[in-house]
Each structure stands twice: as structure tokens, then as C-alpha cells.
Amino acid sequence: MKKGIFVLLIGVFLLIGISKIGHQLKTTWDTHQRLYAGLLENIAKQQASVAELQARIDATEAKAVLSDHDRWLIAHLGKVRDGQAKLLQGLQAQSQHFFRPLYRTWFGNGFMLVIFALTAAMAVLGKPGRLSKEEQDWLQRPPHEISDLRVDPGARRGQLAPHGSASNFITVRLKPRNAHQLGIVRSRTLTAMGLAFLLAPQGGLLFDLFTLADTLLHTNTSFFELPWNTLSNSLMVSIPFAIVGLYLLFNTGHDVRIDRREQVIDLGDRTLPFRDVESLQLNQILATGERTYPNSQIQLNLNNGECLSLMNHAGDDAMYVDLVRLARFMGKPVALER
């Protein structure tokens, strides 16, 4: 019943949203059509005016004898004609690209919606909290019944390691790379976020690049008269979002490697031998950043008294089974609370 109401409300919301978007598109298109019709009417008037001035000039020049007034009139009408001809040329150039800003807006927004829809589907279908059968079995068993897991409540330390960025969803998982290595990999949710930031704002930039290339290849516009200002404005929007997207995709802990053959934990900026790790523990913390979220954390307790955070996020079950996997893989005692 609750699920049906939830689906119904989402459906109504989507229908209202689509209706409003359709109405706004129609209104915008009708407005531009009226403006374009006015522009064409103005062009027609200017063409008639230029033709009339030219006819008066031709009639005056056709006289057998030209007086001083005739010569002055020809020069005056010529200047007026040239001015109106220049104005007409500008109006005609405007008419050729009249709908381009509208098309750019529609293409950019449509591109953004498609990217958001694809990345949202990727995040939802990816099911970052989905556990394997083995991991589900670990969740259902008491810790002391899990094979090859050394549970030692006395290994817990009161000192908490400094945590990473706060998160309200599962950002990373600990997965086998091969029989001898574990690695921290991004969740699909985080990958989808990175791709959304990287790609969604690029629709306007793609349209501007296409327009620039088309203008360069099919018109006599010089290189320096191309619409560089529009392109630079698009880059000012695209570059910051691309930086955020690349950060999410390439700076989210996936360089961490735990190698059982070499007996080391490679943290990227630091390498720890297994022998330096005394124990592991699972912490429940309040991770702070721009906001505060309850997070689970895997903590490495070193022999020298130092405590390091391996990873933290909001997925309690995922963090628990990842710690079980790590403790069994390294053969280290672990302090668990379930």
C-alpha cells in the first residue's frame, strides 16, 4: 500500500513536471515565432525603403541635365540608402541565426536531462549496498562463528582515527583484485555523480563548438570574427564542473591496495607492512564536512600506537562485511560491534 502511494505520487509529480515543461516550451516557441515574424516584417520594410531610394536616385540621374540641387539630392539619397542598406544587412544576418540561442538552450538542457537520467539509472541499478551470498552469510552469523575471523574485543582502542570526507551514501567498497590483492573501488553511485558533474554541463559547449566549426567551414567569416565570446562563456561554466567530476572519478581512494603476497598495505602516499598493523576495528562516528552524517569507519591500529582510517561512509552493512573480508585476508584480530 505504502509503495503504491509512493509510486503514485512520483507519477503525478512527473506528469505535472512534463506538462509544465511542455507548456513552457510551447510558450517560448510561440514568443520567438512572433518576434521572428516582426523581424521579417522589418526586413521587408527596409528592403522596400532601400528600393524606393534607389528608384529616386535612378530617376534623378536619368535627367538630361542635372542641376546643383539634383547632384546634392543624389548624394544625399545615396548616403541614406547606404545607411539603410547597412541596417538591412544587419537585420538579415540576425534573421539567419535568430533561433540559434533558443536551440542552444534546448540542446543544453536536453543534454543535461539525458545525462542526469542515465547517471541516475546507473546509480539506482548499480545497488551499491548489494552484498554477495558470502557477505550476506557473514551478516547473519555472529562474528565468532565466521571462519578464519579472529575476534578480539580487547583490541579496541578508545582513540579514533581522523576520518575522510563525510558521506551519506556508500562511496567505496573493498573488493578482491585477484587471489593475492584487495583494493578499494568506487561505488557506482559515486561514479555516477562524477560522470554527472563531468558531462551534464557540456551540452552548451558541444553546441558552441559545432556552431563555431560550421561557421568557419561554410561562411567567409574570418578566424578572428568567430563567436569566441560565446565559447569562452561556455568554458567558464564547463571547466569548474569538469574539475569536480574528475576529482570524484580519480581521487576517491581507489589507489589503495592490500597485497597479501608482499604483505603490505599501499595507501598511495604511504606503505604499511602487515607486521606494523596490530589490529582492526569498526567505528561508528559522526563524520563532519559541509554537513554531519553518521558513518561507519574501518580503523587500522598500528603497533606504534598510531590509528589510521582506511575508509568511511554511511553503509553500515557494507562496511561491516568489508572489515570482515579485510581481517580474514590479513589474518589480524578485529574488534567488532554488531
Image (cartoon, rainbow, N blue to C red):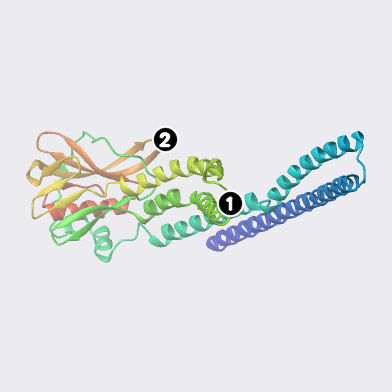
* Figure quadrant of the N terminus: bottom right
Q: Which mark is residue 220?
A: 1
Whole-percent x, y for residue 265 in the image: 15, 47
In the visual, does 256 lie left or right of 303? Answer: right
Whole-percent x, y for residue 105 in the image: 60, 50
Could you classify mark 1 by the number of other residues whose Cα lies within 10 Å: few (under 14), some (14-19), or many (20 or more)?
Answer: few
* Element at label 1: loop
* Element at label 2: loop
Whole-percent x, y for residue 280 in the image: 17, 45
User: What residue would you read off at disc 2?
Assistant: 290
In the visual, does 172 lie left or right of 12? Answer: left
Quarter-of-image position of residue 289: top left
Residue 333 visible in the current orientation:
no
In the visual, does 321 lie left or right of 188? Answer: left
Tag 2: amino acid = Glu
Is 261 drawn above or below residue 247 in the view shown?
below
Residue 20 visible in the current orientation:
yes
In the visual, does 226 lie left or right of 134? Answer: right
Kindly report the distance in space between the C-alpha atoms of the residues bearing marks 1 and 2.
52 Å
